[in-house]
Amino acid sequence: MKWESLLDDGFNLVAGAVSGGLDSCTVTNWLTSKGFTVNCYTVDLGQPDESNVDSIMNRMIASGASKSEILPGKALLAKAGLKVIQGQAKYEGGYWNTTAIARPITTKIILDKIQDSDIKVFFHGATGRGNDQVRFQLAVNMINPNINVYAPWRDPAFIEQFPGRQEMIDYCHRHGIPIGSKVDASYSTDANLLGLTHEAGNLEDVQISSSFVRPGMGVWPFEAPDKPEIVTVNWVEGIPVEINGDRLGLVEIFDKANTIGGRNGVGIGNHVVENRFVGVKSRGLYESPGMELLGSSYEYLLQFMIDRRAREFFETISSIISKQIYQGYWMDLATISALNALKPITQLITGKISLKLYKGKVEFDSIENTPKSIPFSLYTDDSSMEAVGSYNHLDAEGFLQILGVSAKNVGKKQFKFLNDTWMND
């Protein structure tokens, strides 16, 4: 979509999802210069890299916005983050979907804010080479199909004037736009309560070690203390309610988990190269200390509750949820169905579990194992090597005889061929 067509159709009033960074300031000023009235909205997602979220309003007004507002979003993001944990939704097995889940949350909050206004255009500063453009676009399309989505990075006129970051920096300097010091960083950071995403700049050169990145939510594992730290998390029906005996709300739970996990290097630097939805590979470095701490405690508890058939079911659903979030389909039928399919499992997750944190690792330490504290646990003494439990060693004889029938058939008819032809190939 081109900016001229919006004006031709009478859409001169636009609303933008802005972070207060270089892209936001540049786009806002550029649209204003073209004759648009720009309303800017920043959702407070607990950005750890922004010491004063309210200061973003001043930057956006200085960039030409006619209105700038901060909208609360931490509670809604924390709820979504919990669902990510309950689904163990790690994209390509490597990292938690912290940035991906924030996009539909941001979009919904802004669209709810402008639903009774005359605004019919939503804009964002996501690049045309990345995933976020998809996430914003699909979220807007699903929440309010009557809203137009304008993406400057897909407008030929904008790309011609701003082919890269340096041109945007020069533009802002010429126009006296207060873009701040972060533009001089050798990489780009996107942040929220659940985690940080570091991309671009020197990170794009895979010949350079990523150790030049300074963690924003803790320390590198090699910088963490030499002494392990024990942390206890209490879960009730799939919800974390206490950390180290402190009963807290969900946002505060994430805050405390971030602090504890971060100082031990947990969840920092846990991914390298990913397959973007648009079909290209990118290098990123991610931080999610609270998600990793809470997510690991959930996973350990999960294994106490579900048998192997439920485990296979869970892993299938988990994979679906992870891809759905990454690709921008958080709000569609498949995601809602998958999340609801996990509810019977989620409601079983009750228990107080202790973890050992050491230089980036999260290990199971112990669990309060009583019928009252972990009522749905399937862990019993039946597997003991001692003379306890209801499992009779002798009963295994018949079980193994049955398994042996098919194994012997393989041995008689296939094993030699398979071994000679394929095993030694």
Image: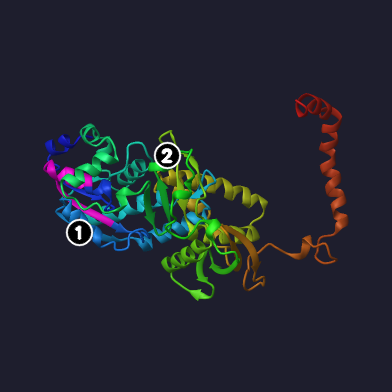
Which residue shows up at 44% across the image and 47% down it? 325
Q: Quadrant of residue 123?
A: top left
Q: Residue at 29% across / 61% down in the picture?
A: 53
Q: Residue 198: x percent and y percent?
A: 41, 48
Q: Examine the rendering and report whether any part of residue 237 can be seen.
A: yes
> Is-magenta flag for residue 214?
no
Q: Going from the N terminus, do you reach mark 2 or mark 1 first?
A: 1
Which part of the image, by quadrant, shows the C terminus?
A: top right
The amino acid type found where label 1 is placed reads Asn
Q: Quadrant of residue 375?
A: bottom right
Quadrant in the picture for the N terminus = top left
Q: CA distance from mark 2 to mark 1?
A: 32 Å
As helix, strand or loop, the secondary structure at mark 2 comes to: helix
Q: Assign a secondary structure to mark 1.
A: helix
Left or right of 299? Residue 45 is left
| Residue that badge 1 annotates | 58
Asked whether 41 or 346 is in front, the reply is: 41
Q: Give the residue type at disc 2.
A: Glu
**Does 334 appear above or below 379?**
above
Give the residue number, with chain letter if any, for mark 2: 204
